[in-house]
Image (cartoon, rainbow, N blue to C red):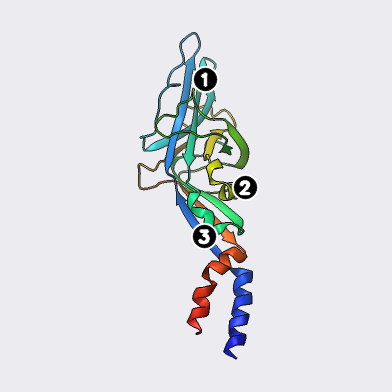
Amino acid sequence: MRGIVILILAAAFLALATVEVVLETDGDSYVRYYEEWESEPQYADDNYGAEPLMYVLYNYYQWGEDSERAYMHFDFSGLDGYDGADLVGAQLVLHAEHGGGGPQRFRAVAEAWDEMTITYNNQPSWGGQLALTEMYAGYNYVDLNTGPLAGWVDAPKTAYGIVIHDTEQVQEYDPSAKIHTRETEYSPELWLTFTGEAVAESSWGEIKAAFE
């Protein structure tokens, strides 16, 4: 009889097993470009990797341009145990001091970069879109396209991170988002949800042992 119970539990566990993995960013920064007509560009070679806030902004003024983009990186190298599992959910959790300036576009980063050396002039290229949403003050839970991130699980060296940029002109001096960095208590996090037999098999031994 106990064997039947174990088999029933095994079937249910294999069907429903999920696990959530939380990754904290191991690198974040923003880049900035500012130019007024008939003057030299400013900030394009400055690095902001040690700052407590990242800014997102795009303004094209009558007299110039101001652009700020936020970058963050997450280490996927410790997820090799989830090979064969299905990535069914991905949320980027950010805490912002300011928002509501219009939708931001979240994209995969396509090249390696470093938190303490990235600038507007040397920033990496981008890949596909992960999300399009508007951020607000407080916690933001951004649902991401899991396709590119599943590729990062399989090939961690290609996990170059996420960039956030504005999709339209804000037409005000404040950034559309001010995001806390890992230099604060509100470090950006990536919540990944896995399901499938690979997840179930990793914990099934513990459940079986409880009935023996």
Q: Say if 128 sits above or below 87 in the image.
A: above
For discs 3 and 1, the disc positioned in front in the rendered view: 3
Quarter where residue 198 is shown: bottom right
Query: Which amino acid does the dot numbered 3 rest on?
Result: Glu
Whether pointer 2 and pointer 1 mark residues with C-beta atoms closer than 8 Å, the reply is no
Q: Residues within 10 Å of mark 2 (few under 14, many from 20)?
A: some
Along the line of sight, the residue nearer the viewer: 73 or 62: 73
Query: Which amino acid does the dot numbered 1 rest on?
Result: Glu
Specify the label residue 96 is tagged with.
none
Whether pointer 3 and pointer 1 mark residues with C-beta atoms closer than 8 Å, the reply is no
In the current view of this chain or complex, which residue is farthest to the top? 38
Q: Position of residue 13 (x, y in %)?
A: 59, 73
Mark 3 or mark 2, which is nearer the start of the sequence? 3
Mark 1 or mark 3, which is nearer the start of the sequence? 3
Q: Helix or strand or loop: what does disc 2 sit on?
A: loop
* CA separation in Å, label 2 and label 3: 16 Å
Q: Position of residue 64 (x, y in %)?
A: 51, 16
Residue designated by label 2: 145
Q: Residue at x 47, y 55 (%)?
A: 22
Left or right: 19 in relation to 52: right
Q: Residue at x 59, y 85 (%)?
A: 5
Whether pointer 2 and pointer 3 mark residues with C-beta atoms closer than 8 Å, the reply is no
Residue designated by label 1: 65
Mark 1 or mark 2, which is nearer the start of the sequence? 1
Q: Residue at x 62, y 66 (%)?
A: 197
Q: Say if 50 sits above or below 94 in the image.
A: above
Query: Which amino acid does the dot numbered 2 rest on?
Result: Asn
Residue designated by label 3: 20
* CA separation in Å, label 2 and label 1: 31 Å
Q: Helix or strand or loop: what does disc 1 sit on?
A: strand
